[in-house]
Image (cartoon, rainbow, N blue to C red):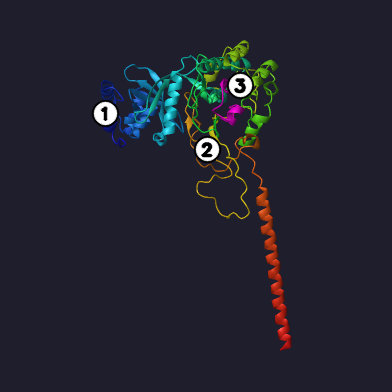
């Protein structure tokens, strides 16, 4: 549809696409006589007939796109590589919902569509107050969309950026609820695989909700891979070491690790391994423990710091075996301050969670961590024989390293919830990336040359030396003969 050029064009678009009820639109036209399109849209927003987002879409000629099935779109809550999340209202029931819409570039991608349906089915298997409910999915609609429970809240990532780090009691209160939701997921055989602050919402009552089941795996399925065994799924800052080894062979303990890393972020203001270099981050995750929280925050009890360290134990066998045990361990510490969660929703960033000023560890903005798809290097090929032809590799031959590429997004609800990046699409990045040697589980050492090959190589080398010597002697004889001939003449 073309952009409206006159006020009447605006009214016609609103009536044709049923954005505003005819009676309310007629009443508006009788009360106001806006001079141009911009003033008409501004007045419609002021009078509550349109939201600011709707006015922008109508002004751009996209009024028809404000409908998704029976839902009228009110606002955009977040966006990312996978698509966008909108706040919408059912035209008959009046119920508000969050609707995730698959992006234009992925609508023809079978993998993205399967993942979309997988998320809906996984959520349908769960009915828990700490997990965002999914009500419906429509893959036949263009664009495909998924209808979710709308949470009037904020992501934990945005909460720390806005209001500062959490106290021990606040972090524990969050952890109890997340672990409770994970216990329900584990009971039906689901592993989330992407627990992180950006995928956890806290509402104005303090209830915490787990969302984004896009890369969930089913522990009882024999064909539960969404990618090959050499692909790492998850968010580097929060995934467990064993998830970096094989993302398909994980259980509830991987989610427990991610919960521990999330609690670490809430208290420290940064992930457990904050270095920017991916290789260093992966190596540190496998080989060393992060600094205890009580070293970064003296107000954190040593016992609670040790509890978080246990959640993040590098060996899965040293963690709690089930999320229910985490609930019991965190519950005695769950004593948030009286102004929680209200302080998270104040315009000011001042925090009364603890008596201290913000530290350098606290983020100044709200950059969301990437959910990455990393392809491990393939096995090294045996060394080529010395007589092998030299030249570029054949088309399609694997190189010495593979690429890592963040591409899709996990869209979230709430303020500051711009999408984190996600998985399953490989695109060439600006630089090359190679996993540390400790993580190259697929790599094998080059095979040594066989004895027969060595013998053949030695024979060829000696023959070449002999031929060279004969040629040199022949050249000397020729030169000497020429000199004698000149002397005689």
Task: Read off the residue under disc 3.
Answer: 260
What label does residue 405 carry, if any? 2
Residue 38: x and y, percent?
34, 33
Question: Magenta region: which residues?
Answer: 235-263
Crowding at mark 1 (Cα within 10 Å: few <14, some 14-19, many 20+): few
Residue 195: x and y, percent?
54, 24
Task: Compute the Cα span from label 2 to label 1.
Answer: 43 Å
Q: Which quadrant would the N terminus be assigned to in this image? A: top left
First in sequence: mark 2 vs mark 1:
1
SS of the residue under disc 3: helix
| Mark whose residue sits in front, 2 or 1 | 2
Is any part of residue 96 visible from this angle? yes
In the figure, 223 relative to 464: above or below? above
Task: Compute the Cα span from label 3 to label 2.
Answer: 26 Å
Look at the image and say whether residue 237 sits in the magenta stretch. yes
Task: Compute the Cα span from label 3 to label 1.
Answer: 52 Å
First in sequence: mark 3 vs mark 2:
3
| Mark whose residue sits in front, 3 or 1 | 3
SS of the residue under disc 1: helix
Look at the image and say whether residue 253 sits in the magenta stretch. yes
First in sequence: mark 3 vs mark 1:
1
């Amino acid at each position: 549809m073309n952009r409206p050029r006159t006020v009447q064009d605006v009214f016609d678009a609103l009536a044709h696409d049923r954005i505003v009820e005819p009676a309310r639109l007629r009443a508006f036209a009788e009360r106001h006589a806006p001079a141009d399109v911009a003033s008409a849209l501004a007045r419609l927003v002021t009078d509550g007939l349109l939201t600011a987002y709707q006015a922008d879409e109508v002004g751009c000629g996209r009024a028809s796109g404000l409908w998704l099935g029976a839902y009228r779109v009110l606002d955009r809550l977040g966006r990312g590589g996978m698509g966008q999340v909108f706040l919408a209202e059912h035209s008959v029931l009046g119920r508000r919902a969050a609707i995730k819409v698959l992006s234009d570039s992925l609508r023809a991608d079978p993998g993205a569509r399967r993942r979309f349906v997988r998320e809906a089915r996984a959520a349908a298997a769960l009915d828990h107050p700490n997990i965002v409910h999914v009500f419906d999915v429509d893959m036949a609609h263009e664009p495909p969309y998924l209808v979710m429970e709308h949470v009037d809240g904020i992501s934990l990532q945005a909460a720390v950026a806005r209001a500062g780090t959490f106290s021990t009691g606040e972090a524990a209160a969050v952890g109890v609820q997340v672990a409770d939701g994970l216990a329900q997921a584990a009971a039906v055989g689901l592993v989330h695989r992407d627990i992180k602050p950006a995928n956890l919402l806290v509402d104005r009552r303090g209830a915490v909700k787990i969302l984004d089941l896009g890369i969930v795996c089913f522990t009882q399925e024999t064909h539960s891979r969404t990618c090959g065994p050499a692909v790492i799924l998850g968010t580097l800052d929060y995934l467990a070491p064993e998830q970096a080894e094989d993302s398909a062979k994980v259980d509830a303990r991987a989610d427990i690790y991610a919960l521990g890393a999330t609690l670490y972020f809430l208290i420290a203001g940064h992930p457990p391994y904050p270095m920017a270099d991916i290789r260093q981050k992966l190596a540190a995750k496998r080989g060393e423990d992060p600094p205890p929280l009580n070293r970064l925050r003296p107000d954190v009890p040593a016992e609670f710091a040790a509890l978080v360290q246990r959640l993040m134990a590098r060996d899965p066998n040293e963690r709690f075996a089930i999320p229910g045990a985490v609930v019991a361990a965190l519950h005695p510490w769950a004593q948030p301050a009286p102004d929680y969660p209200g302080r998270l929703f104040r315009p000011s960033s001042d925090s009364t969670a603890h008596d201290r000023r913000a530290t350098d560890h606290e983020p100044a903005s709200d950059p969301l961590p990437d959910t990455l798809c990393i392809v491990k290097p393939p096995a090294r090929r045996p060394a080529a024989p010395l007589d092998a032809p030299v030249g570029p590799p054949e088309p399609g031959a694997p190189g010495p390293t593979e690429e890592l590429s963040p591409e899709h997004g996990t869209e979230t609800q709430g303020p500051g919830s711009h999408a984190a990046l996600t998985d399953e699409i490989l695109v060439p990045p600006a630089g090359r990336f190679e996993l540390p040697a400790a993580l190259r589980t697929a790599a094998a050492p080059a095979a040594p040359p066989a004895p027969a090959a060595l013998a053949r190589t030695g024979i060829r080398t000696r023959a070449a030396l002999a031929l060279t010597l004969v040629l040199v002697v022949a050249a000397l004889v020729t030169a000497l003969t020429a000199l004698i001939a000149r002397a005689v003449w």
